[in-house]
Image: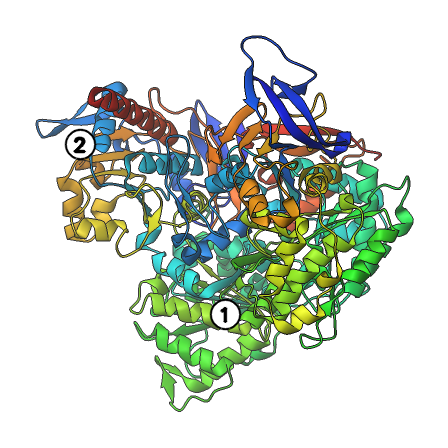
Amino acid sequence: MPIVKNVTCPICGTFCDDIELTVKKNKVVDVKNACAMGEAKFLNYSDPHHRNLNPLIRRNGTLVETSWTEAIKKSAKILAEASYPLLYGWSSTCCEAISAGIELAEEIGGVIDNTSSVCHGPSILSIQDVGISTCTLGQIRHRADLIIYWGSDPYSAHPRHLERYTAFTEGRFQPSEWKRYVSRLRGVIGKKKLERASQLALMEEFSVPPITGNQFPPTLETEKERKLIVIDARRTHSAEFADYFVQVEPNKDYELLQAMRMLVKNEELEVEKVAGVPVGVLEKIVDVMIGCKFGVLFFGVGLTMSSGKLRNIDAALALTRDLNFATKFVIMPMRGHFNVTGANMVSIWQTGYPFSVDFSQGFPFYNPGETSAVDILSRDESDAALVIASDPVANFPRVAAQNLVKNPLIVIDPEKSATALMADVVLPSTFVGIEAEGIAYRMDGVPLPLKRVVKPPKGLLSDEEILRRILREVRKLKRSQRRSNA
Amino acid sequence: MTELLIRNGFVYDPINKIDGEKMDIAVKNGKIVEKIEGKRVKKINASGMMVMPGGVDIHSHIAGAKVNLGRLLRPEDHYKDVEPRTSKTRSGVGYSIPSTFTTGYRYAKMGWTMVMDPAMPPLKARHTHEELNDTPIIDKATYPLLGDSWIVLETLSEGRIDECAAYVAWELNATKGYAIKLVNPGGLEAWGFGRNVSNIDDTVPNFNITPREIVRGLCKVNQLLHLPHTIHVHTNNLGKPGNYENTLKTMQCVEGLNHNNRPLIHITHCQFSAFAGNDWRTFESAADKIANYINAHNHVTLDMGQVVFSDTTTMTADGPFQFILYQLSGNKWINGDVETETSSGIVPFHYKRSSYVHATQWSIGLELALLIKDPWKILLTTDHPNAGPFIAYPKIISWLMSRKAREKMMKRINKKARSKSLLPTIDREYTPYEIAIATRAGQAKALGLKDKGHLGVGADADIAIYDLNPEKTDLNANPRLIRRAFKHAAYTIKDGQIVVKGGEVVKSISGRTFWVNVEAEKALVETRILKEKFAEYYTVQYENYLVPEHNLAVSAPIQVHAEV
Ligand code: SF4
Ligand SMILES: [Zn+2]
């Protein structure tokens, strides 16, 4: 049975590239190295219940199967006739498709926006304000002796992040935290459990309480080895692995960050607790941050979406920037979809802007809050939309979703989705990274190839090919329009 | 394929020693040919105009991870400078870090047809190439950053030159790169822990090697591999007062490796490395000291890194330098380190006429270009966008060609800088022939690009025609005419096709991406050592690191046979 090695996993921003797939009769039958999330995807993606195998078009209120020619023509007509169309999604497809999408948006004078406008949008806006001190994940693996996750639960959302890039890896200058974690476990539980403990997948069944509360573990201040701190409003799975867990009161992240900034600048805090954390503990955490050789702060939507949003990230970026006067410190958003970073990248190099790009004036214009998908839809400004590789009907605020579906709607997606059910045209595509090739960018901006490991079902086209065909058809329509006008 | 006959222009083709001769240039199948006849030949009347080879830029940050983060950082830079789409061109934005399409068009509009991106982190090579693919019209190439790569440091510190050479050959193939780039050698590895090296003889922390050994080692590697370009070096201590001594040492340290009088090292954006003084207060020009050395030696080429007074965005792989710039300016700062290989930093920056330091930097670049006698040794760049955006080239050409233009600017700069500047003592004015060297012939020669930078039979038909009449106009007295002519080429011809006419893009084509395909017998390509090291050093798989040729929109490999 052919085994395909070095496959990238088209699921989360960890974007693992060491997956091994066993393929039998054009089907993935075995998956090595992936986490449960990745494995499930590779094994189950082709379930016919979850995907359409023919284009659909709405006739008399119901979606019925149709030919590609008709579906593409109809899509092109919708987009060419619209005065302010919206093209949304993009974070779970390859860069080649995104590139085609931008060209289409420019051609029809529409708006192209990717999902980062509703997740890490505040992070990106903050970077535009403050800048960012960051690096690739290997720097962390080799050098970081202090790893902090804030408002992010990698164990659940980026399952292999810890094991591939951070606490549980071996680096040139840093041994693995894993060893210490295991030895700590040893003190608590029996040998049998220990063996099982080494398998991350079984971790759910028991947990070692991380040291938390008022006493700060003395080891954290003295030890030379890698330390893992988790800061979150809830005690997450990842907190169970940490050397220290800081529970911040919900929506008080900003206060905590500002207090830390003051401590870094040697200012005194005149209160006993900040955001539920005793100042004495906070001082020690800041000492560890200043005293480390290489620190990193990963933050997730727990920080970008808690109240304060932009302010939170501004403070986090400034905190880590300021720490560089004392030591090396970096920060990185935990990007969700496997190619949300690529969606930003392509958009930036082609238009200057990372998302929410409006071509209605003939050149790229960017004003998030005005040109972002949710805002356009909430104000009911767009008159048609194309949604690709995303499910806004399930995720957007209700008004936005309602306005999205009341106008002509085209959906490109390999899977059935709530949005697809409401569409006027459904263009089923191949799964990029399994059935089609491409390029995508890991959360730290490292570009990697997406592989084609099996042949797609007959008749299905890739996201890129579908978009290129629509674009060609739109141009044809416009030409004939010009001719009839002349 | 179009056949073209460019008639009666004043031709400046320094490689073929043609200095303003009135003659015809014939083009067929994208190449310059002896002559061409027939009805299908399209004729361009270039009488009263200058005809030059297409411009070549040896050092301009136009693509890749760092450039793109620079674009991200600066929406305010884009708002003020937009390009609407036309029937021939895609839309885009400027200013100091234009989007990719705009970059290609703007170079072409000035008559430039080949640009080298000088700083590609090997791990992110695919990104650089994706952007180069989206940069229309011009030909491109890119230099992988190798001066702080762990495998380079290790093999050199253990004296395993051959192995280092094999590794570099592998990297050039793997990343589709063109030349060996060193940025603050050793300093970027140190920056991984927030440190730096202080001079060429400082030891790199955790690695038993000095910058001097890295420079010499990679210079030898460059020779072993027979690469078309020399090593391309951004010196240690760049941007610091007093750094000229380190720059001289860097040039000296490879002197002994010279044979047959050919260049061995390119010191890039030399303006930033020609500072005297002990601190910013005593800071002054050391251009004369650098120029004296260059005038007495033949193993170095330089490019200017000319400052233009403008708002711009600085971006280099020199992480520690960018951090200093952040501290000096207080502007927003991006740092982006790359595992096992390199670092980078970005800081917006405004060069002000009223600033003593900035005005002196402006003077240093021009002093270098005017004091170095041989124009083949110093090439025109702004280290785009570090000292200013490339769209300022016409202005710089006017400063080089016209004393009057320099004097006019001198009147407007910081007084102390004016009184200390060497420029008032310099009468030299570049001739069009010398401009053709500094902007195309010399650049192509330094890069070892045989078919570029000249108009001899067999050369690529990359041609710029400027509406400037050297017989009728007193060029030195009319800097404004110079600027206008070089800003909007009357024609730009790329691979034999008219792409720009009257300063506007009339046709957009895809340029090629050049890279060096080194055939090395001892190639480390599949060796166990590399693969083992690789798994240990990188967070990506060996196979996924390699950029396949089909990732390049138009691949143009240059075959090279190495000695190892
Ligand atoms: S961590 Fe993410 S990328 Fe890696 S295998 Fe799991 S789902 Fe895939
Ligand atoms: Zn540079």
Q: Position of A42 compared to A69: left or right? A: right
Whole-percent x, y for residue A29 in the image:
44, 31
Whole-percent x, y for residue A276 in the image:
35, 80
- Camera-side residue: A209 or A466? A466
- Camera-side residue: B318 or B363? B363
- Camera-side residue: B325 or B525? B325
How crowded pointer 2 is (Cα within 10 Å; few <14, some 14-19, many 20+) is rated as many
Q: In the picture, residue B111 is in which quadrant?
A: top right
Chain bearing mark 1: A
How crowded pointer 1 is (Cα within 10 Å; few <14, some 14-19, many 20+) is rated as many
Label disc, if present, on residue A424 of the rendered structure? 2
Q: Determine whether B157 is above or below B434 in the image.
A: below
Q: Earlier in the sequence, mark 1 or mark 2?
A: 1
**Residue labelled 2 has its Cβ within 8 Å of some atom of ligand 1:** no
The lab-note entry on whether marks 1 and 2 share a chain reads yes
- Residue wearing tag 1: A320
Quadrant location, the C terminus of chain B = top right
- As helix, strand or loop, the secondary structure at mark 1 comes to helix
Kind of residue at disc 2: Asp
Q: Residue furthest top?
A: B38
Whole-percent x, y for residue B336 in the image:
56, 57
Is residue A174 in view from this perspective?
no
User: How many angstroms separate mark 1 from mark 2 (CA)?
Assistant: 47 Å
Quadrant location, the N terminus of chain B = top right
Q: Determine whether A58 is above or below B391 in the image.
A: above
Q: Position of B429 compared to B354: left or right? A: right
Q: Residue furthest front?
A: B472
Q: Determine whether A241 is above or below B263 in the image.
A: below
